[in-house]
Amino acid sequence: MNTEQKPGCSVTLNAPADPGEQLTLLQVHPRDNVLVALQPLAAGTTLAAPYQHISAKQDVPAGHKVALSAIAKGEPVIKYGFAIGAATADIAVGEHIHSHNLATLLSGQVDYKYDGCQAPTLSFPAGLPTEFMGYRRANDKVGTRNELWIINTVGCVNRAAMRVAEQARKLYSSEIDGIHAFTHPFGCSQLGDDLANTRTLLAGLIQHPNAGGVLVMGLGCENNQLSKLLAASPGVDHSRIRSFNAQQVEDEIEQGLEAVAELVAQMRHDKRSACQVSDLVVGMKCGGSDGLSGLTANPLVGRIADLVAAGNGKVVLTETPEMFGAEQVFMARAADEKVFGDIVTLVNDFKQYFVDNKQPVYENPSPGNKDGGLTTLEEKSLGAIQKGGSAIVRQVIRYGEMASNSGLTLLEGPGNDAVSSTALTAAGATLLLFTTGRGTPLGFPAPTVKISSNSVLAARKPQWIDYDAGGLLKKGQDATEFSQQFFSYLLEVASGKSTRNEQTDNREIAIWKNGVTL
């Protein structure tokens, strides 16, 4: 079995020919002193060649680590070619490595040094399709859907917005791609940056190109005033916006349906046309990760990131805490010293956010991640950042802001699935790639492609999973060919092929609440 470490800490699996047979073990990088069990190992099992001189000392679940060499207490445990922590006890060859004998090496803030951009040059492969059928808007942005979105300024009108959407779907569902109300509990009793975050996030959704029409519903007395929200959305086509405050009309449901009728009358004439990869904005997210996420699904998404960046499209990556311990990989790929400084500020500000709230900076991974084989934040982060591929980091944006540069953009946001995926959508992502090792039914305003890290999950939850990256673990599977097939599938989704979250109508938003509530 051979592994190759690509620039930017990107993993490629290359295996000997024997199509259909599953790999059982993987050494991710030649420097690693651990193996990853790709299938459960029973205590006493002799490992597969070329590791037949090793036997498992304990039961090792799939996705977990087993010692390839002896590791003394205090010595680093190496995976992805980097230290993912230090041994807290002597570890013998063949031992299971997890929370009982491995701990993080991370603590506090770090001093960083700019050494220039070390990202590789990317080129778009000949023969791959470069077009999809999208909706080009008046501002030249391109949507992958032609939907009517109902956005409310404040949680007080949630039910009214939902009733308008429910009734409108009965009337107009065959004329456009969808009608959806994206409700939330905020907009009132918020102050300062907390209120600004809510307003900026909602403004990004109002300007989203997948929304061919937007109805904005307010109450009238809330902190998040309707007029100020609309003023924060300068990129909109005002002919495609309708808005009102419920306190100022006699019947808010009737008023909402009248507004929807006006918008649908315009939207029904919108047609798909040929668009280029450069028109795509793709958001990258992982949730419910396991020990295989950083080996299959995340590197697969990373190769897509490189293809989109090579085609001058936009790629947006968030989950700032899941960069901790691996942030220097992105810093080495900063386009210039300013972007490098922006990455440093992004990381250190988020660490300070933990400190200000009297929380440990490195309290991660989650219980589900640990069950799946992830032990330390370094390990989780090195796997998570695989989604960013090896492209140059062109831009760093704050929560609620929109991506404007081609290539890779880093977006400020927490690891929470719903909050970060909503932020990706508000940043302009017209397609979300969501990798998972444990599964989730969550879906968001933009088409959300769920990619499983393992085939067991894909088989057990076909109603959740769109694509099975576990196929990369079959011997003889060519990773480049696999990723190019996935890229072609994504262009089909961008052209209208529905995702599981669309088929099951799993769509929602969540806003990052990080301030005082009155």
Image (cartoon, rainbow, N blue to C red):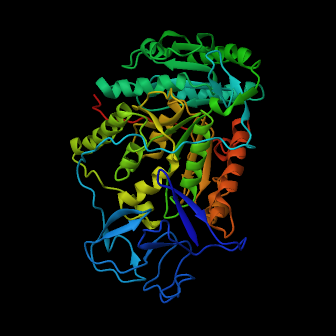
Quarter holding the N terminus is bottom right
Residue 470, quarter of the rendered image:
bottom right
Q: Is residue 463 visible?
A: no
* Above-or-below relation of 451 to 67: above
- For residue 237, side relative to residue 223 (left or right): right
Q: Camera-side residue: 119 or 324?
A: 119
Can you give x and y, in whole percent of width and height, for residue 87 in the image? 30, 72
Q: Is residue 407 above or below residue 254?
A: below
Q: Nearer the viewer, residue 229 or 284?
A: 284
Judge whether residue 370 can be spotted in this image.
yes
Horizontal side, residue 25 vs residue 107: left or right: right
User: Foreground residue, 13 or 355?
Assistant: 13
Identify the residue at horizontal 47%, vertical 32% (top origin): 184
Q: x, y (%) of residue 439? A: 56, 56
Question: From the viewer's perspective, is 464 left or right of 267?
Answer: left
**Residue visible at 63% across and 44% down?**
501
Above or below residue 24? Residue 362 is above
How many numbered badges does the structure rendering display? Answer: 0
Is 452 situated above or below 246?
below
Expressed as whole percent of the image width and height from the top left, the position of residue 323 reads: 39, 48
Q: Quadrant of the C terminus?
A: top left
| Between 224 and 433, the one nearer to me in the picture | 433
Q: Is residue 198 left or right of residue 16?
A: left
- Residue 465: give x, y in percent of width and height: 64, 53
